[in-house]
């Protein structure tokens, strides 16, 4: 039941080239930076990543992206990541863009053993009808486009069929966790981390504060340990390393 491993390097040592990864985080919040850095140092290549966004400010998944280690991204937000946009438009990177709520539910459904579900999001657009550019050919043309999806009507409303997502591994970051893998997330870090953790067949969690079993109030646990296979305890310095994407002030 003790799922704690000695280091991040050990936790990702068996991730092979070409693996699929669900990665938690929302902007710069709750990103498993330590595990991502360990994966970069291990040299894993040709990765297929499922994440809300693909890193920012040269941190998070942007580390792997800049090194050319990511072959495909399934996500919902490019944002201000210029390298992401460059690789996508030049045909170096395959990208499947999904409505944000649909991405969240596809991860949750996959983790819950639900193969597919119907949603109204995307009906009447290329999300359902197909034709979204997944890969460009480098000269402005589309080399690979999304296929059409099944659309059905229920009670007078049209819905598109979306498939649940399962990945080989999941990398997440939690504010607190115990040795059994029970996790608690802080505020916006909870948006995608629990869902990514559910989707992974092998889920690795880096935790800012490791506690003993029984220390967490069961009613406060956001993700039960059944979804987590490995836990990495961060050092105080690693736990305190949190970036701010845009500093704002108010009067």
Image: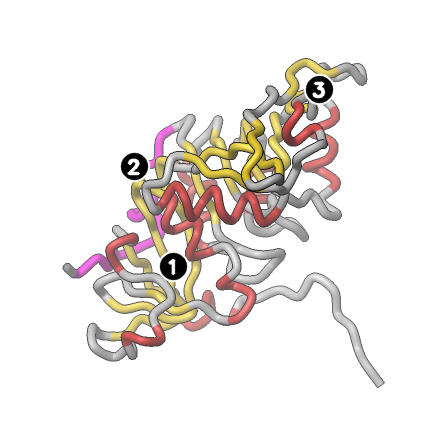
- Taking the image as shown, residue 19 lies to the left or right of residue 244, namely left
State the residue position of label 3. Answer: 136
Report, in whole angstroms, how far the alpha carbon at label 2 lies from the one at label 3: 32 Å
- Tell me the element at label 2: loop
Relative height, residue 213 to residue 129 (above, below):
below
Q: Is residue 198 left or right of residue 65?
A: left
In primary-sequence order, the first of circles 1 and 3 is: 3
Residue 176: x %, y % from top left: 37, 71
Residue occupied by mark 1: 206
Q: Is residue 243 above or below residue 63?
A: below
| Magenta region, residue range | 2-16
Label 2 or label 3, whichever lies nearer to me, is 3
Residue 134's spot in the image, x, y percent? 64, 24
Q: Is residue 39 visible?
A: yes
Q: Residue at x 51, y 38 (%)?
A: 118
- Which residue sits at x=46%, y=65%? 238
For marks 2 and 1, give the CA distance. 16 Å
Q: Secondary structure at mark 3?
A: strand
Residue 69: horizontal and vertical position, in percent? Answer: 53, 31
Report the magenta stretch's main SS: loop
Q: Is residue 14 left or right of residue 50?
A: left
Residue 14 shows which numbered tag? 2
Name the N-terminal-most of marks 2 and 3: 2
Q: Is 7 covered by the magenta stretch?
A: yes
Query: Dot 1 surroundings within 10 Å: few (below 14), some, or many (20 or more)?
Result: many
Q: Is residue 199 magenta?
A: no
Q: Residue at x 72, y 31 (%)?
A: 125
- The x, y position of residue 83, in whole percent, is 70, 37
Q: CA distance from mark 1 to mark 3?
A: 35 Å
- Give the mark toward the camera: 1 or 3: 3
Q: Secondary structure at mark 1?
A: strand
């Amino acid at each position: 039941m003790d799922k704690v491993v000695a280091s991040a390097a050990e936790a990702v040592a068996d991730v092979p080239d070409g693996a699929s990864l669900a990665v938690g985080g929302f902007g710069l919040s709750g990103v498993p930076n330590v595990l991502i850095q360990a994966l970069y140092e291990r040299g894993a290549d040709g990765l297929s990543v499922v994440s809300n966004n693909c890193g920012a400010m040269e941190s998070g998944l942007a580390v792997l992206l800049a090194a050319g280690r990511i072959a495909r991204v399934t996500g919902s937000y490019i944002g201000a990541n210029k390298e992401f946009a460059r690789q996508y438009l030049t045909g170096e990177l395959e990208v499947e863009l999904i409505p944000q709520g649909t991405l969240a539910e596809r991860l949750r459904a996959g983790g819950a053993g639900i193969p597919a579900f119907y949603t109204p999001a995307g009906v009447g657009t290329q999300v359902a009808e197909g034709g979204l550019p997944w890969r460009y050919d480098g000269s402005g043309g589309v080399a690979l486009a999304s296929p059409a999806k099944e659309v059905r009507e229920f009670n007078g409303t049209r819905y598109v069929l979306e498939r649940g997502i399962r990945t080989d591994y999941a990398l997440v970051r939690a504010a607190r966790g115990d040795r059994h893998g029970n996790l608690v997330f802080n505020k916006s870090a909870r948006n995608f981390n629990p869902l990514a953790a559910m989707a992974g067949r092998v889920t690795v969690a880096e935790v800012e504060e490791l506690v003993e079993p029984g220390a967490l109030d069961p009613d406060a646990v956001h993700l039960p340990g059944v979804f987590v296979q490995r836990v990495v305890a961060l050092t105080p310095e690693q736990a305190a390393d949190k970036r701010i994407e845009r500093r704002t002030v108010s009067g």
